[in-house]
Image: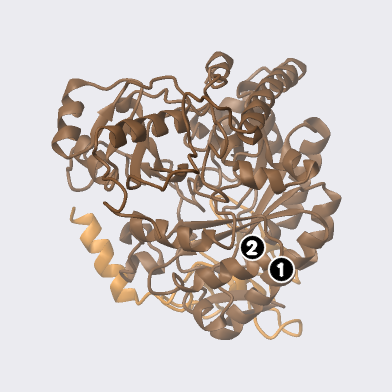
Amino acid sequence: MALEIIDSCVNCSACEPLCPSKAIFAAKPHYLIDADKCNECAGEFDDPQCASICPVEGAILNSAGEEMNPPGSLTGIPPERWAAVQAEISAR
Amino acid sequence: MSLQTTEQTVSPAFAPAGGGCGAGSCGSTASQMNGLSDEVRAKVQDHPCYSEDAHHYFARMHAAVAPACNIQCNYCNRKYDCANESRPGVVSEVLTPEQAVKKTLAVAAHIPQMSVLGIAGPGDPLANPQRTFATFRQLAEKAPDIKLCVSTNGLALPECVDELARHNIEHVTITINCVDPDIGAKIYPWIFWKNQRVRGREAAAILIEQQQKGLEMLVARGILVKVNSVMIPGVNDEHLKEVSRIVKAKGAFLHNVMPLIAEPEHGTFFGLMGQRSPTADELKALQDACEGNMNMMRHCRQCRADAVGMLGEDRGAEFTMEKVEAMEIDHEAALARRQAFREKANAELEAKRARAHAPAPTTQVVTFHRPARKPQGRPVLMAVATKGSGVVNEHFGYAREFLVYEATEAGVKLIGHRKTDKYCGGSETCGDGESRIDRIIRALEGCEVVLCSRIGIEPWGALEAAGICPNVEHAMEPVEEAVMAVWRSLLEAGKLGGVGQGERRA
């Protein structure tokens, strides 16, 4: 049982000091979670702390590999709107 | 900018009674400075972000040591990192406190105008208290002459006020976009509060409470507070008048209403959802409306969280960590250069103030006030190309921005600036292929005159064709004096209407 930080992490560092298990560490190219130390904040907090402050949708996965903060959940930007604008910009 | 250019700003004709900008328009007007204690004046006179006068002389830098944030704003995208963009929250490299101190010392050695180190992100400085305060502590030891400054969203402010005071921080900027949680819910999707992500109205209510509490605590400790507000049309534009009244009543020193920056390519909620930015006219109207209550800042450039140099320039590329590491610096000589520059600049500013406060002489080269006569002549907006020292000293073609002044019978007032490049300073033909001169003409909408030190024949013709009159007759003259002189010549030429004619400010 452990969370995982993936490559959409922007290295903002917000999660690192919050981790009660000191499982999060700075690494290249992005922060990582030591799976042996992470207990998903069980018994410490209602919500995993890293996933509660992370500003990037999709950057943290749960032990099932699912996004803790799925697209649209933090910014309110509907994923289809984001995709449409991306397509428009790359077509320029 | 050289010390020599600086000296030219002291001219006998400069700034008679009531000169400079209009009463209460900025952090440095004669009337405002009149009301300030010597202690407060000393705090702002060399801070470019707190004093309009100081911004013509002094430089600042932001150290990007604070990447973490504790809230999300709808005008911010935490994924951004682009060297060609200049706007808040954008940085090229995040620094450790040690690197930041090294960089600050390098900048202060190469730019004697450097007077302030600010920490403004790219996240929130007070959401990274260890990094922020470690930077302040180390810099205060090594360069005690550099003022320290911080810009925060306010959420963690109350718990940090004592530590800010301990570190001798004299200036704090709080971004306050609302005092109404229903409006806040449209600006902030979530905050991180007491170990939870809190959303919606509840989040906004907590943030607002913390901001107001922090403001009161800072004022109680004698720390100067500037309030930044982002003007978001249809969301908080009308509401910011109330914000202005409230923060003024609580003792904020200066209010800076900035236009929303929202392009789809920035990837922000507002940018992607089609929220528009205010026009220059709308921004000015709101700033004018707030001005009755509050000292308004008009010279903000909405700079990057790693900006370096005078407010209108960004010299960050000269001071990457790679370059800084390779520099050999004589810190004592650098300190002596800074002190020499400050003495000169402060003496000039003091002379300016003395003139502004002196009783109006009977004869005057330029007269700002003629109280015996009824006002005549309509207000005119003029754009000025300057690279510092408060004089008209920039070539039209080199200007990356123009300062916009409003001239009226009552005097000259800075009302803002217009960038000639897009926020992205990439290729010339980036985007729609609009030519540079077309872009400048569009940026100068509403301005009738452009003052610069020189200008080529081609742009001269293009400006004239667009109804904007280029003027190089006042090269190297103090800006306010030059603008007033042009306004008077327009008036005398009968181009501004007489009494009862033309537009009139309310």
Instruction: Give the letter of the chain under mark 2.
Output: A
Q: Which chain identifier belongs to the orange chain?
A: A
Q: CA distance from mark 2 to mark 1?
A: 7 Å
Q: Is residue B317 left or right of residue B223?
A: left
- Under circle 1, the secondary element is helix
Residue shown at 32%/47% (left/top)? B378
Residue shown at 29%/73% (left/top)? A81
Depth check: give the residue in front, B149 or B30: B30
Tell me what hue chain B is rendered in.
brown
Q: Which residue is mark 1?
A: A18
Residue shown at 82%/46% (left/top)? B168
Percent position (x, y) of residue B346?
A: 68, 27
Instruction: Give the letter of the chain under mark 1.
Output: A
Residue A14 got which mark? 2
Depth check: give the residue in front, B337 or B104: B337
Q: Is residue B482 left or right of residue B432?
A: right
Depth check: give the residue in front, B96 or B27: B27
Marks 2 and 1 in Cβ contact (< 8 Å): yes
Occupied quadrant, residue B334: top right
- Residue A9 seen in the figure: no
Query: What is the crowding at mark 1: few (fewer than 14 residues within 10 Å), some, or many (at least 20)?
Result: some
Q: Are marks 2 and 1 on the same chain?
A: yes
Residue B335 got which mark? none
Q: Amino acid at mark 1?
A: Leu
